[in-house]
Image: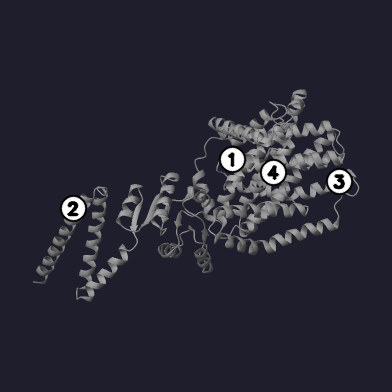
Amino acid sequence: MHSGGLELALVLLLAAVIAVPVFKKFGFGAVLGYLAAGVVLGPDGLGFVQDADRILGAAEIGVVMLLFVIGLELSPARLKVMRRSVFGAGAAQVALSGLVLGGLLLLDHFQWKSALVVGVALALSSTAVGLQLLSEHKAINSDHGRLGFAILLFQDLIAIPLLAAIPLLGGVKNETLRWEDAAVALGALAVVILCGRPVLRRVFGIIARTRSPEVFTATALLVVLGTAWFMQEAGLSPSLGAFLAGVLLSDSEFRHELESQIEPFKGLLLGLFFIAVGMGIDLDRIAAEPWMIAAGVAILLVVKFSLLYAIGRIARLSSRQSLLLGSVLWLGGEFAFVVFNEAQRAHLLGNANHDRLVAIVGLSMAITPLLMIALLRLLGEEKAAPRQAAEADKVAPDNRPKVLIAGMGRFGQVIARLLTAQKVPFVALEANPDTVADLRRFGNQLYYGDPTRPEMLRAAGGEHIDVFVITVDDPETNLRAVRMVRRLYPDATVLARARNRQHAWRLMDMSAEPFREVFGTSLEMSGRVLTALGVAPNVAERHVQQFREHDEKLLRDQYLVYDDEAAVIQTSRDARNDLMHLFEADAESDDDKER
């Protein structure tokens, strides 16, 4: 395709829009849809794109953003808990898979240097595909999902020394790793880890006070891409840099806002990445050597699946969880393409073997979603899955809250204090960055964000929330937030602050339970007025309770006719007369008791 960038963008977007819904409709998942679109558009398909490597290089930004979002979900405390899984299970998987696959390559007349590099490269799994599959099947927080992520994290770490070793093993002069390069890499890591948190939080605090969403979005993208670029310039993985930036911001008040801002870009660029991978699959090589390529894919999947299953069992996963772990990580990884290219340049791989290996890894990535679907159908539904997930949430460092408070002004703070005293976990959102900063100084856990935005509610874990408490002061914003919650989570309980009766009726239209903001305090003061006039405290308390019940009934009665002003006025007059008669009868009853 020789047309400009606009035409290319249109073709790629059109392919995604057509392929993904079709594949998801048949239960194949989005990843396979993107890969199939890439194969059709690539040089061996319709030929719309001839230079797939150029698109792949740009689309790798999607993987960078994916790692940033994952970092936001992992606090330093949780990473510390995961260290055994990362350096235990992760190291075991890479070492054993590299050893077995490298040994098989030696039997296929590979030199030991080539076998070592290619074996370790094949041991690496696709972070993008693996995490996307876990996300699609809602398994990221499952036992096998957490262990799978730990293994993928170690693979990202080991990829750096692997790339550095290729020139050394290939005997390429002046391209070996020097101690100066190692010092620069370690210095870059130190700068990001030590300076990242205070600097980034300060920057986002300043930007949030501008109340400009587009500037906040630009700042978020700048931080993700800037950190990735900084680490790349230091000789490290850009994905590792983005991941570290996410971890450093994981316990900040901007965590959910950042996730909601990055999510759309991440999804789109990840889709482009999978399309580019599909374009890189060499159909001519597969057609020329079908049995050799098929055998290579089968050996790769069987070896990695067997070792991953064994590692899962050693890590005390159930047989089912171990099988699912193997089905997520048995494929090859996108980083293998980079390793193969470097190995070819260092004369460790010939052209034919390079093309075969690229085809094997590409096919393994393409068929993994299908094989995982087949395995899930074979295993059937797990009856105890909801209970196990709930138990995992209870012990997880980021205990999932079931309550969301939107608005942490005077109204919301009282609710938050009561929930805190009862040790009920909740997530709180506040659109005023100054309020967020003030309350966090006192140890309150709340986040900066606008509760009227759907991506913000999703980032805050809305799908796990049972009770939404909307205490936003502005009535229109309050109504928009309730409307959004009702649209996204129709089965959730919604309790909303109401400015007045008219506001309460509009909330009731959306099946929200209204709480008039000064009603309770006014009743409390009314009772105190009565006692100050000499009414007995118990009588005053009874009268206040009678008035409350009567007014709540009046609110519901008027709700049925609130669009008819004359009916509302007449209902109010009738209710006032009924209330006077009620109090008169109550007073006569008290007089009879005294006699």
According to the picture, the residue beneath numbered tag 3 turns out to be: 167
Return the mark for residue 320. Answer: 1
- The front one of 317 and 558 is 558
Mark 2 and mark 4 residues within 8 Å of each other at the beta carbon: no
Numbered label attached to residue 350: none
Q: Earlier in the sequence, mark 1 or mark 4?
A: 4
Location of the N terminus by quadrant is top right
Q: Which mark is residue 570?
A: 2
Single out the mark in the foreground, 2 or 1.
2
Is residue 137 left or right of 110 when viewed as pictured?
Answer: left
Residues marked 2 and 1 touching at CB (< 8 Å): no
Circle nearer the N terminus (2, 4): 4
On the image, the x and y values in percent for residue 425 come to: 48, 58
Binning the other alpha carbons within 10 Å of mark 4 as few (below 14), some (14 to 19) or many (20 upward) gives: many
- Seen in the picture, residue 302 relative to 85 is either above or below; the reply is above
The CA distance from mark 3 to mark 1 is 42 Å
Residue pictured at 88% horizontal, 43% vertical: 170
Q: Which residue is mark 4?
A: 60
Question: Distance between the Cα atoms at labels 2 and 1?
Answer: 66 Å
Labelled pair 3, 4 in contact (Cβ < 8 Å):
no
Q: Label 4 amino acid?
A: Glu
First reached walking from the N terminus: tag 2 or tag 1: 1
**Amino acid type shown at disc 3:** Pro
Residue at the spot 38% in from the left edge and 54% down from the top edge: 495
